[in-house]
């Protein structure tokens, strides 16, 4: 089941990127069956996920990028980590907090020997590495630093991590983009070619990123 579903709209003329989270528990038509939208990827991969989003939301998406937890951690490490405001609740929740999620990831990735060194022990703004940031982005049982709860908080965390990745990439020299993209591609499955991605570099370098989610409040 896909943990995160986002629609990215890239306006090359105005150099803006818009990121819209689709709540993973949204009940929609998935290939003729009414169920949660996060089932689409597990049932039919990116093709069914795209078809489901297009049919239910009136879109015409043709391209995709998908990444697993391990790959996402690698991407974050490539840019040197991301800044996150970690709350006391996110640390103290021993069952569903950041350190519990770090432990789960260490187990799946086969790096339990690194578990103790990866634990987040103090709240506040700090740079998280890949494993830590992915763990933080999965939290939904604690409110964020700005008070967003449940899956609303989780999608806000996920957009924050991508926004931080965007800022890191935007601050790079354009000359570093080819090396950056080549380092990134082994950790991502995408329908986009290297040349198609490299053409987006000027949008990232001089652009802005906005984020929201559906459904909206109220």
Image: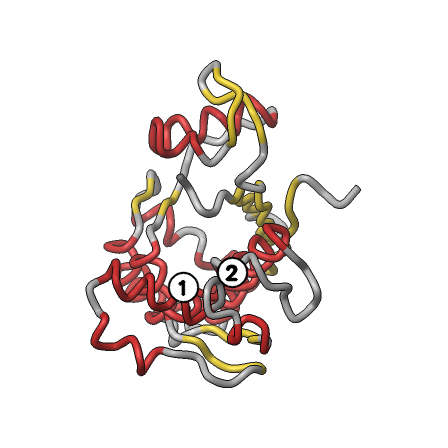
Q: How dense is the environment of label 2, judged by Cα within 10 Å: few (below 14), some, or many (20 and up)?
A: many
Name the one closer to the observer, 153 or 21: 153
Badge count: 2
Circle 2 SS class: loop
Q: Is residue 59 visible?
A: yes
- Residue 122 tag number: none
Question: Which of the marked residues, 2 or 1, is nearer the chain's N terminus?
Answer: 1
* Residue at point 32%, 59% (across, down): 181
Residue 39 percent across, percent down from the top left: 43, 32
Residue 134 percent across, percent down from the top left: 42, 63
Residue found at the far bottom of this picture: 122
State which quadrant residue 76 falls in.
bottom left
State which quadrant residue 25 falls in.
top right
Is disc 2 in contact with disc 1, using a CB cutoff of under 8 Å? Answer: yes
Per the image, the residue denoted by label 2 is 139
Q: Is residue 205 left or right of residue 194?
A: right
State which quadrant residue 214 falls in.
top right
Name the one closer to the observer, 94 or 166: 94
Judge whether 54 appears above or below 118 on screen: above
Q: Quadrant of the C terminus?
A: top right
Circle 1 SS class: helix
Q: Is residue 175 visible?
A: no
Q: Separation of disc 2 and disc 1 at Cα? A: 8 Å
Q: Is residue 123 left or right of residue 215?
A: left
Per the image, the residue denoted by label 1 is 101
* Residue at point 72%, 43% (across, down): 216
Residue found at the far top of this picture: 32
Residue found at the far front of this picture: 95
* Residue at point 55%, 57% (across, down): 140
Q: Is residue 83 left or right of residue 108?
A: right
Coloration mode: secondary structure
């Amino acid at each position: 089941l896909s943990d995160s579903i986002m629609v990215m709209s890239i306006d090359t003329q105005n150099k803006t990127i818009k990121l819209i989270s689709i709540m993973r528990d949204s009940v929609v038509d998935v290939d003729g069956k009414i169920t949660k939208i996060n089932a689409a990827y597990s049932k039919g991969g990116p093709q069914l996920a795209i078809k489901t989003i297009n049919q239910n939301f009136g879109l015409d998406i043709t391209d995709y990028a998908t990444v697993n937890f391990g790959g996402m951690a690698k991407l974050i490490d490539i840019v040197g980590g991301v800044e996150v405001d970690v709350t006391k609740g996110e640390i103290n929740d021993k069952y569903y907090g950041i350190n519990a999620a770090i432990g789960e990831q260490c187990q799946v990735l086969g790096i339990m020997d690194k578990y103790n060194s990866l634990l987040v022990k103090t709240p506040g703004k700090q740079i998280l590495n890949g494993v830590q940031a992915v763990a933080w982005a999965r939290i939904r049982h604690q409110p964020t630093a700005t008070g967003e709860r449940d899956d609303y908080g989780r999608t806000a965390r996920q957009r924050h991590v991508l926004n931080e990745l965007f800022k890191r990439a935007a601050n790079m020299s354009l000359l570093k983009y080819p090396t950056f993209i080549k380092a990134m591609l082994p950790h991502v499955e995408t329908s986009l070619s290297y040349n198609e991605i490299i053409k987006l570099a000027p949008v990232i370098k001089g652009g802005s990123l906005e984020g929201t989610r559906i459904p909206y409040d109220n």
